[in-house]
Amino acid sequence: MHIFVTAAALCVCLLSYGQVQQTNNFMALPQSRPQGEFSVFSSITKYLAAGDVASLSSWFADNLDVTVLSTSRNCSKKQAREILRNFFASNTPRSFEVTHRASETNKKYLIGLLNAGGELFQVTIYATSTGQDTYKIQQLNISRQMAAY
């Protein structure tokens, strides 16, 4: 009986502070942010899925390493934007799915699969902190996904 009363009091307290949503007579604690420390990638993945090079390039460092298929180069933000524009002109994106995320102090990594132009491409992104939760892409790699046997 004491446990039930304590649990009910906690629910009433949380409801009064707006911390719990009540739907269909059930109570649920608020959802945590889906990506937490990787929220930096939420916009980036959206832009990749849409092939939105203009918005994606706002995340580029002033100079970055770009590898598209087998061509690699260190280039300016403007050059990287043109490289990606050409890639997406030939490979219309349909979807992007994150397969792996990792982080170190002031560094974030993302690997995902881009479905574009009827093919699958592995995309790897390395971003570093520029201060106060702001990150810039230092490396972007797009390679054809090899079929698994």
Image (spheres, grey):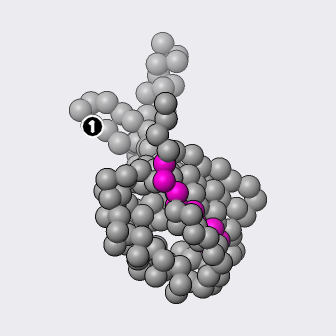
Above or below, 21 relative to 108? above
The residue segment tinted magenta is 135-145
Residue 50 placement: quadrant: bottom left
Residue 4 position (above or below residue 97): above
Residue extending farthest to the right is 105
Secondary structure under badge 1? strand
Mark count: 1
Residue occupying image coordinates x 69% and y 74%:
131
11 sits left or right of 72 in the view:
left
Image coordinates for residue 67, horizontal then vertical, percent: 58, 67
SS majority, magenta: strand
Q: From the viewer's side, name the closer residue of 98 and 43.
A: 98
Question: Residue at the spot x=39%, y=36% of the render?
Answer: 28
Considering depth in this image, is 60 or 115 the residue closer to the camera?
115
Which residue is located at x 65 percent, y 78 percent?
A: 74
The residue where tag 1 is placed is 23
Q: Describe residue 125's horizontal placement relative to residue 27 as left or right.
A: right
